[in-house]
Image (cartoon, rainbow, N blue to C red):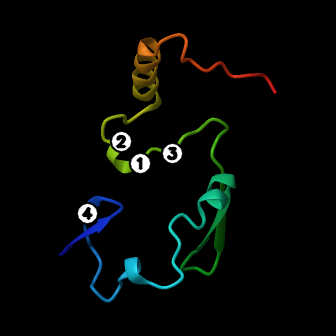
Amino acid sequence: MKKIEFKGKVEQEDMKSEYDFLNMKGSVRGKYYKAYRAGHKVEINKADGTTSVQYFKLVEGAVMLEPDVKKYFPNSESVNKALRSLIAIIPSKRRIVAHPK
């Protein structure tokens, strides 16, 4: 297994060398990000010939954590507690107040 570097991060590569996505022409990182966040459907074709369809959509206000962050903040409570701690140390002049739409 070789190590690869992508945007300054070094990661272990689990795929065979013939699957070199970093040098692949036309590949775009995050190409389907917006569509995924908007919602998507998964069709599961079962061995008995039937198909099960499931729809997924992130709840309003949901945030996706990167795997390295999720190790430290496994649930909403821990994320909110950490963010509130950060908010408390931001000088009041720099705090941004959300404006109603």
Of all residues, the one furthest to the left in this rendering is 1
Q: Which residue is drawn at 78% across and 22% down?
A: 100
Q: Residue at x 35, y 83 (%)?
A: 20
Q: Which amino acid does label 3 sit on?
A: Met
> Mark 4 highlights which residue?
11
Q: What residue type is labelled 4?
A: Glu
Q: How crowded is mark 1: few (under 14 residues within 10 Å), some or many (20 or more)?
A: few
Relative to 80, is 58 on the left or the right? right
Quadrant housing the N terminus: bottom left
Mark 3 vs 1: CB contact within 8 A: yes
> Mark 1 highlights which residue?
66
Q: How crowded is mark 4: few (under 14 residues within 10 Å), some or many (20 or more)?
A: few
Q: Distance between the residues labelled 2 and 1?
A: 5 Å
The correct choice, above or below, for 65 with respect to 5 in the image is above
The correct choice, above or below, for 37 with respect to 100 in the image is below
**Could you tell me which secondary element the residue under label 4 belongs to?**
strand
Q: How crowded is mark 3: few (under 14 residues within 10 Å), some or many (20 or more)?
A: few
> Mark 3 highlights which residue?
64
**Could you tell me which secondary element the residue under label 3 belongs to?**
loop
Q: How far apart are marks 3 and 1 (CA)?
A: 7 Å
